[in-house]
Amino acid sequence: MTETIAFQGLPGAYSDLACRAAYPGWATLPCPSFEAAMDAVRDGQAKLAMLPCENTLAGRVPDIHRLLPESGLSVVGEHFERVEHCLLAPKGATLAGLKRAHSHPVALGQVRRILKELALEPVIEADTAGAAELIARRGGTEDAAIASALAAEIYGLEILRRNVEDAPHNTTRFYVCALDKAPPFRGECVTTFVFRVRNMPAALYKALGGFATNGVNMTKLESYMLDGEFTATQFLADVDGHPDDPALARALEELAFFSRELKVLGAYPAHPYRRAHRGG
C-alpha cells in the first residue's frame, strides 16, 4: 500500500515538489491550509505532513511556529528544497507577447529581474500552483505564471524560461511531522523545541547559558508573540544533538529551570544540506 504525505497548497506547489523529492513513490495529499495538512495526519489520511518553516529570502513561516506546538504532532525529519521559479504559459505563448505574470506575492518579489526585463505587470494570486492552474484554465498568450516545473507538467503549460529567480540560494526548509516521534536512528541529530522564560531579570541569558557551558551548538533561535500579547513571548529553537545526549540533557535541564514552559517538538536526523552548507 502506498504511503501518503500531506502538504498545504494545490498540486504542483513547491511543498508538493518537496514531498516528491524527499519521499519518492509516496502519494501526495493537497490540503487547503496548514491546519488541514496537520489534521490529515491526525485523522489517518496521511502518515506525514511536509510543512515549510523558513526560507532563505522570505524568512520564517509564522503560521507554523504558532500551530505546531499545539498540534500534537512531532517533528520527525527536515527537508531543504531549492526554489527554482519558472515562467510558465499556455502553448503558443512567446516571451515577446507576454504582458502579465501571476503568482504568490513572495514569488513575485523574488523574480523582479525578469519582470523588469520583459516589462510584465505582476498579478497577485493566492499561491504559485494556483496561478499555474488559473493560467492553464484561462488560456491565451498574454498571461504567464511564476511557478515550479512540476506545476507546468501537471497543468500542461510550456516553460518559457527556467530559473528566473533573482537569488540562486533561494531555499525553503521544511519540518516533516508525524503522530509519533522519530524512530531510533544513527548519525547527526537536530532537536527542535519551544520555551517561555520566567519573568525575571536576565532570564533569557540565564536560560541559554547551559547550551554554551555544555558545548551545544544552537542553529536557530526565534521569538514570536502569543495571542497578540506583547508580554507573552515564546521562543523556538533548533540545536545540534539528541535530548538523550548528556550535554544536551544538561542544557535542557538548565533551560527548564529558568522557563515557565518547555516543550520538545522533535529530535530527528539532520538533512545532508546542513553538512554541505556548514560555515567555518
Image: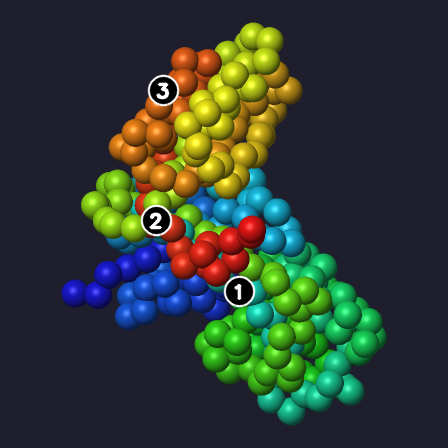
The numbered mark, 3 or 2, whose residue comes first in the sequence reads 2
Check whether the beta carbons of the residues at disc 3 and disc 2 lie within 8 A of each other.
no
Taking 88 as reference, is 7 left or right? left
Residue type, numbered disc 2 = Glu
Check whether the beta carbons of the residues at disc 1 and disc 2 lie within 8 A of each other.
no
Viewer-closest of 53 and 144: 53
Q: Residues within 10 Å of mark 2 (few under 14, many from 20)?
A: some
Q: Position of residue 128 (x, y in %)?
A: 58, 64
The residue positioned 41% from the left and 59% from the top of the image is: 272
Viewer-closest of 155 and 19: 19
Q: Mark 1, mark 2: which one is toward the viewer?
A: 2
The residue positioned 55% from the left and 14% from the top of the image is: 203
The residue positioned 68% from the left and 88% from the top of the image is: 93
Check whether the beta carbons of the residues at disc 3 and disc 1 lie within 8 A of each other.
no
Q: Residue 253 bears which disc, if any?
A: 3
Dot 2 lies on which element? loop
Residue 96 in which image quadrant: bottom right
Q: Position of residue 52 (x, y in %)?
A: 49, 51
Q: Residue furthest left?
A: 1
The residues tagged by marks 1 and 2 sit, at their Cα atoms, a distance apart of 22 Å
Q: Residues within 10 Å of mark 1 (few under 14, many from 20)?
A: some
Q: Residues within 10 Å of mark 3 (few under 14, many from 20)?
A: some
When the figure is inspected, residue 231 is found, relative to residue 244, above or below; the finding is above
Residue ID for mark 2: 188
Residue ID for mark 1: 82
Quadrant the N terminus occupies: bottom left
